[in-house]
């Protein structure tokens, strides 16, 4: 079955960097789009970034653009999110999610999430 397991979340100071990873299994990684979606405390889900598992096409939200970089390793079936210049408002649970198309409402599967806290 599909499994998405995130890791790498932790407490980091404002201005710091963090790299999140998502280990994917149970499906053909290169055939799907892979997303990062986050949920801040008390708020709704916010889409962050997406990459096609095969072609490597990427898109970012305006808030992520220029600070975050999404990448993939097809050999390891791993998705990553490099986050730089972190701000307190980046504090959230970050989820890895697999979608059929580059559209958030086509998300098929979710990971359990990893907590990122940006605070001094």
Image (cartoon, helix red, strand yellow):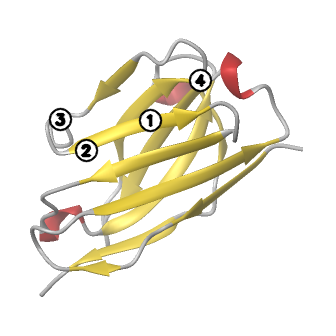
Q: Which residue is mark 3?
A: 65
Q: Quadrant of the C terminus?
A: bottom left
Q: Quadrant of the N terminus?
A: top right
Q: Among all residues in the image, which is located at the extreme right?
A: 1
Relative to 77, is 59 on the left or the right? left
What's the CA distance linking mark 2 and mark 1?
A: 10 Å
Q: Nearer the viewer, residue 118 or 81?
A: 81
Q: Residue at x 21, y 42 (%)?
A: 64
Q: Nearer the viewer, residue 18 or 59?
A: 18
Q: Among all residues in the image, which is located at the extreme top?
A: 55
Mark 2 touches mark 3? (CB < 8 Å): yes
Q: Which residue is mark 1?
A: 71
Circle 3: is it few (<14), some (14-19), or many (20+) Cα within 10 Å?
A: few
Mark 2 touches mark 1? (CB < 8 Å): no
* Local secondary structure at mark 4: loop
Q: To which quarter of the image does residue 20 belong?
A: bottom left
Q: Which residue is mark 4?
A: 53
What's the CA distance linking mark 4 and mark 1?
A: 9 Å
């Amino acid at each position: 079955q599909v499994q998405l397991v995130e890791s790498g979340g932790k407490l980091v100071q404002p201005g710091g960097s963090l790299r999140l990873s998502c280990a994917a299994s149970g499906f053909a990684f290169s055939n799907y789009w892979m997303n990062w979606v986050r949920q801040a405390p008390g708020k709704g889900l916010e889409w962050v970034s997406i990459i096609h598992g095969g072609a490597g096409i990427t898109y970012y939200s305006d808030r992520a653009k220029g600070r975050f970089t999404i990448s993939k390793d097809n050999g390891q079936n791993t998705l990553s999110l490099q986050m730089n210049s972190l701000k307190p408002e980046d504090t959230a649970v970050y989820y890895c999610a697999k979608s059929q198309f580059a559209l958030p409402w086509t998300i098929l599967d979710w990971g359990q999430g990893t907590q990122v806290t940006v605070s001094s």
